[in-house]
Amino acid sequence: MTALLATICLILIAIIVVQIGKVTELASKIRGEEEVEEQANKRHGNYSMLFMVVFLVATVISAWYYKDSMLWYGPHESASEHGSSLDSIFNITLFFTGIVFIITQILLFYFAWKYRGQRGRKALYMPHDNRLEVVWTVIPAVVMTFLVVGGLDAWNEVMADVDPNEEFIEIEGTGYQFAWHLRYPGADGKLGARDYKLVSATNPLGQNWTDPKNVDDFHPSEIYLPVGKKVRVRITARDVLHNFYLPHFRVKMDAVPGMPTYFVFTPKTTTEEYRRKLGELNLNGEPKYPEWHEPIDPNDPESPKKYEAFDFELACAELCGKGHYAMRRVVKIVSEGEYQDWLSKQPSYYLSTIRGTEDDPNKDMLFESEIRERRQEFNDKLEKAISAEDPAAKTIELNHVNFETNSAELTKLSAYQLDNLADALNKYASMSIEISGHTDNTGEPEYNQQLSEQRAQKVKSYLLGKGVAESRLAAVGYGATRPVADNSTEEGREQNRRTEFRITAQ
C-alpha cells in the first residue's frame, strides 16, 4: 500500500511539473521571452545570495558544534609530546584556509548575482591583467611558504629517529587482514630477527629462533606503554597495505608489505589522566563535556559512563577490506611502576609456544634466562628441603636430569642442573646426600633395577668430577619399586622415570 501511494505521489508531482512548464511557456509568449528571462535571472540571483548566507552560517555553526568530536578540540588535546606542534600547524592551516573559503564563497555567489543576465548589459572581455595575476599568485605563494616551512619543521620533529645512545622502548606492529600482531622485546630490550620465509602457523611473524634476541620477545594482545618514555614503533604488513594510526597521539604511518616503516613518539598523558579530563566538571558542578557523561549502553542507565570506560586506541587508517573495523586495538598508557609490573607478567612467545616442540631448533642448548630460572628453582627447593623437619620433605627430584633412552648416558642438558647440585654441595660442606635412580615398570624388573643403579652411579661420578668428596655421596637404584604415578598411562610412566637425591646429613 505504501509503495502504491508513493508511486501515485510521484506521478502527480510529474504532472504538476509539466503543467508549470506549460504555464511558464504560455506566460513567456504573453509577456515576452526577454522579460521572463530577466525576471528568472534576478530571482535565481537572489536565491543564490540567500543560499550563500544560509550555507556559510550553517558551515560555521556545524563546525563549532562538532569541533570536539570532528576537529578534536575541547578535551582532545594531544596525548603525546610532539602532538602540540601538529595541532598548531593544523590550527594555522585551518585559519588561513577558513578565511579563503569564506571569501571565495562570498565572491562566487556575489558575482553570480551581480553579473546576472540583464537587458542592455554586455560582457566585458578582459584578456590580461598583470595586477590581478600578481595578487592571486603572490599571496597564496607567501602563505603556502609559511605553511610548508612550518609543516616541514613539525614533520622533521615527528619523524626524527631515535639516537642509539638514548633510552627508548622499541615495539613492533604487523598488520594483516584483519588484526595487528604486536611484538615487544623482553629483558634484553631488543627485538629479534625475522624472515618472511619462516612464517608458519606457529610462527606468525617469521621470527628466527636461532637469534638469541628472539628468546624473550613476547606477543601481547594490547599496547601497554609507560608515560614519559620515548617509544619507537616498527611497522610492517603481512598481506595488503594497512596504516598504524594512534589518533590521540597524532601519529600514523603506512604499513607496507616488504618495506618496514617506523615512527617515534613520547606519551605525556596516562589513560587515567585522560579519563579524568573527559569527566571534568565546571564551577557549577555540571559536566564540562556532557556527551562523555552518558552511559556506554543507552539501554542500561547503570552502565559505566563513557569517560570511565575510555581507552586510547590503535586503528587501521586504510580501507584494507570488509573486516577493516576489527583492527582496533586498545592502547593503555600507565605509570612506570605499572608498566614494569605488566612487563614482568608477559610470557616469552618462544619459551611458552616453541620451546621443546618440533619447531624448536635449539633443543640441545639452554639460554641464559633458562639457566638462571632453573638455578633459582633448584635453590628454592633446596632451601625449603634444608629447613624442613619432615624427613620425607628432604627428597628433591632432579627434574632436568635425563638420560638417553634405555641408557645410563646423561643428556647434554642435564649438566646444568648437576652443576647446580655440585655448587650446593660445595656451599654446604657438611651436607651428605643419597642419589636414587627410578624407572617405570616397562621391561624386566632385573633390567630396570640394573639401569636405575647405573644411572644413580652416573650422577655420582659427575659430582665426583666436580670436586665433591665421595664420602658425602651414596648412589642407589630402586628400579620400578617406588612409583609416584600410575604406570598404566604414558604420563604416569614418564613421572616414574626420575632421578632424586635425599639429604641424609646437613
Image (cartoon, rainbow, N blue to C red):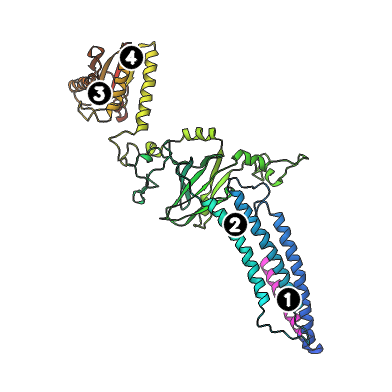
Image coordinates for residue 505, horizontal then vertical, percent: 31, 10
Q: Are marks 4 and 1 in contact (CB under 8 Å)?
A: no
Q: Give the side of residue 196 with respect to residue 310, left or right.
A: left
Residue type at tag 1: Ala
Name the main secondary structure of what is drawn in magenta: helix
Residue pointed to by mark 2: 150
Secondary structure beneath dot 3 equals: loop
Q: Which residues are magenta?
A: 1-24
Is residue 200 in sight in this rendering?
yes
Disc marking residue 428: 4
The amino acid sitting under disc 3 is Thr
Badge nearest the viewer, 4 or 2: 2
Q: Is residue 104 left or right of residue 419?
A: right
Question: Which residue is drawn at the image coordinates 75% and 62% (left, top)?
Answer: 57
For label 2, the SS is: helix
Q: Residue under circle 3?
A: 439
Q: Secondary structure at mark 4?
A: loop
Picture coordinates of residue 328 (x, y %)? 53, 48
Q: Provide residue 184's location: percent of width, then percent of height.
A: 45, 41
144, above or below 133, in the image: above
Residue under numbered circle 1: 112
Q: Residues within 10 Å of mark 1 (few under 14, many from 20)?
A: some
